[in-house]
Image: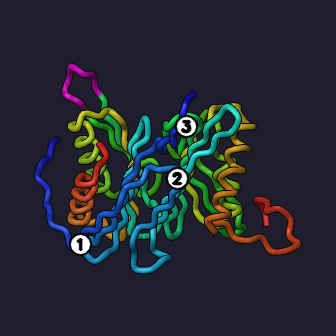
Amino acid sequence: MTSKELDTRFSELLLTEGSDSVGKTNKLEGQGSNDDVQITCFTEDLHDVTFHFQIIKLTKQIYVWIGCNTAKFGHLYAAAITRPNKTVAVTPVLGGTSDNTGSGIARRLVLKTGLNIIVACNIPKDSPTLEVTAERKLFEKLKSLGYIKPRPEGLPVSSAHN
Amino acid sequence: MYSSQPTRFPVTHKSVSLDIKGNKTDIVICKYDDKFLVIVTQIGCMGTILHARKEGSVSTEPTFSVSVIFGKRDEPWLLACGRQLIEHISCSGSSRPLVLSLGLKDHSPETLKELTVAVIENCLW
């Protein structure tokens, strides 16, 4: 089936600048700051590994891509808090069925942000050190961007069960 | 002596915001080494995620496979949108698969047509 006929009318079209520079956050113009899509891209060189991070914050969800040395997409996971007992559910969406690299990051992201999370990650299998390092750098950035809720005083590190 | 040059981020992205039938629609297109990611959202989250890829060898007419990998599996127009885009990617000379996320308030053909055109107008392939 081929189809070449498409309507070309738009009500409004706003074109924003594309960005592929290191450490830059782009914000789409929107009605209010809560509706803006915020895109943050940065790179961290750690020892002999280069991590690339891309964070796309939507109103009710955060998409994160973690690249380890390459810009391959990797495995895709979705994670969210489930009701009624507020545990975190993680599922592989694309790839990731034979190894779980990235699923732990997705789960802990949900715990820290309380938002739905989609994580794409190409960290090699059986590299827990790389995974931990990437996660630490990612959380530092999310905190600096204000996406992580501050932990109330006196409470231990959040766990999966409330 | 080597001068250090700032390296470009390896993933190119482009973002657009437009109004489709009164709904604010944000589109983000990302180009990875081995995939394209297109996020279209009206509801503040990624919504339904589809995977579309080209199949078939160089010598035969390409065929395309589109499937929902997360979310609504009963909206055929979402698949049609994915099918349009993967064919456009293929016609542009790329064999990369597409990960398409559609978080829409309405799934009417008119909306899907408008956002398909908007994605093609701003594509990175």
Q: Nearer the viewer, mark 2 or mark 3?
A: 3
Q: Quadrant of residue A132?
A: top right
Task: Identify the image quadrant of the C terminus of chain A.
Answer: bottom right
Amino acid on which disc 3 is placed: Ser
Q: What residue is disc 3 on?
A: B4
Along the viewing direction, whichever of A45 and A11 lies nearer the viewer? A45
* Label 2 in the same subunit as label 1: yes
Q: Residue pushed farthest right? A: A154
- Distance between the alpha carbons at the discs numbered 3 and 1: 43 Å
Q: Earlier in the sequence, mark 2 or mark 1?
A: 1
Q: Is residue B57 magenta?
A: yes
Q: Is residue A36 left or right of residue A115?
A: left
Q: Residue furthest top?
A: B59
Residue at left 69%, top 49%? A135
Q: Amino acid at mark 1?
A: Glu
Label 2: chain letter:
A
Query: Which residue is denoted by mark 2 in the rendering?
Result: A41
SS class of the residue under badge 1? Answer: strand
- The image quadrant that residue B61 belongs to is top left
Q: Residue furthest left?
A: A5
Q: In this view of the protein, which residue sits in the foreground, A48 or A148? A: A48
What residue is disc 1 on?
A12
Query: Please, is residue A58 above or below residue A94 in the view?
Result: below
Q: Nearer the viewer, mark 2 or mark 1?
A: 2
| Residue at the (68%, 59%) spot, across then down | A88
